[in-house]
Image (cartoon, rainbow, N blue to C red):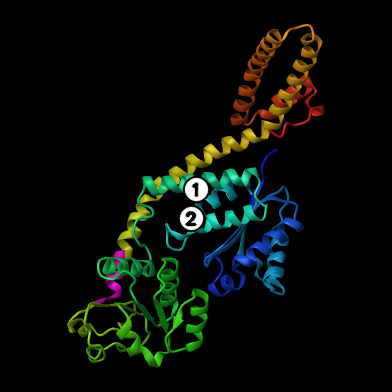
Amino acid sequence: MLQNFKAISLSYKKAPLDIRELIALDETSCRLFLQSLKSFIQASDILVLSTCNRTEVYYNSDKDYSTEIVKLLGITKGIENISQYLDYFTILNEHDDAVQHLFDVSMGLESQVVGDMQISNQAKQAYQWAADNETAGPFLHRLMHTIFFTNKRVVQETSFRDGAASTSYAAIELIEELTADTVADPAILVVGLGEIGADVVRNLKDSGYTNVKISNRTQAKAKALAEECGLEVLPFEDIVKGMKEADVIISSVARETPFFTKEMVKRLDVLTFKFFIDLSVPRSVEPDVETVPGVLVYNIDTIQNKASEALQRRISSIPKVKEIITESIDQFNDWSKEMMVSPTINRLKNALETIRQEELVRYMKKLGPKESELVENITKSMMQKVLKLPVLQLKAACKRGEADTLIDVLNDLFDLENQTVDSQ
């Protein structure tokens, strides 16, 4: 049977953040959604991938279920009239396009930050949910393992995943460099939770930092992010206390004049190193702060230069990444085509085995144990040799896209339609 893999995608390329947030699925919602899809659409190999930048459904079916999928998504999320958002979705109904898209997404070619290191883990998580909910068939199992192997090649053979290519990731990488030899579990304070500040907080969580406090003038925003990431909120009026306790202060405070001044920092009585990472434009940490003994300041230019260098290395690796993906897809397609003829091969084996068994029954009762064993081995060997050429020809015909004719001939010659398919 030919595969008809399809995809429906809502991503940052067409949908603004507020729409993506509205439709994004957490683990519980994702599992519920998978069960709904499994029950209400006639499809196999269903995978749901949901991140902050995309919510996508992949499935195997002759029919286009994109409208039904969006409606089921609305039911899962409790969104009335979700059809109003249909134009934000991209529909991929061509098998090759859907396979290519899943490879490109899983490698990070489609990410906002090219080469995003998180996406490969998110793809593995999506696959695990599909396996747990029994929506993954042989096709999806093979496809995802091919993707994981391809990702390993990309990591080993290119610079596509080297370095931090976004400002927020570069800030995390800088923290690691600054504290690696001085503080085992650095106390981190993030002040200002605009878009970049919130990104930094989420990346701190994903990178395994737990000794993190966040503070913002708007308390409600801080509480919502703290609940999402499992972190502690520091009241904005307690900033000085938080600064004394922190090893690293990350600032993305939006204002026209610096929020952290030399006079404020001098009162901290810094005994060891204290690092300020200023992600604001205009700067929110006064340059003179660095004249306070033990205090080091890193501004947005330092971070962005770091990110730009990593991004350039990744961009220069894209042709090689695409080459690796193409090789993997070619190999996967060969396997996928062979899947189409495997039922015919199994039926042919069963037909020949039936003939062999019928003939053995006629003669074995006249033979002793040694002769019976010898005849058994000889006839099995003969059957394997008889099978070898048709199997090779079928597989070769698959690669040429000409298997249908040969399948019809074998069906007619051996009456294979009346043979059961061996599950093995």
Q: Is residue 59 visible?
A: no
Q: CA distance from mark 1 to mark 2?
A: 8 Å
- Where residue 120 is drawn, which disc sits there? 2
| Magenta highlight on residue 148 | no
- The quadrant where residue 28 appears: bottom right
Position in image of residue 218 (x %, y %): 47, 88
Q: Which residue type carries mark 2? A: Ser
Position in image of residue 179 (x %, y %): 28, 69
In the figure, 58 relative to 219: above or below?
A: above
- Residue reaching furthest front? 369
Q: Is residue 296 left or right of residue 189?
A: left
User: Taken as a whole, is the magenta stretch helix, strand or loop?
Assistant: helix
In the figure, 277 relative to 45: above or below?
A: below
Which residue appears at 75% of the width and 16% of the height?
356
- Residue carrying label 1: 148
In the figure, 187 relative to 267: above or below?
A: above
In the rendered structure, which segment of residues is drawn in magenta?
Answer: 297-306
Which residue appears at 67% of the width and 56% of the height?
133
Q: Is residue 359 left or right of residue 117?
A: right
Which residue appears at 71% of the width and 26% of the height?
407
Position in image of residue 142 (x %, y %): 58, 43
Q: Which residue type carries mark 1? A: Phe
Q: Is residue 11 left or right of residue 173?
A: right
Instruction: Answer whether labels 1 and 2 touch (C-beta < 8 Å).
Output: yes
Q: Is residue 390 visible?
A: yes
Residue neighbourhood size for the residue with mark 2, other residues' Cα within 10 Å, grouped as few (<14), some (14–19), many (≥20) = some
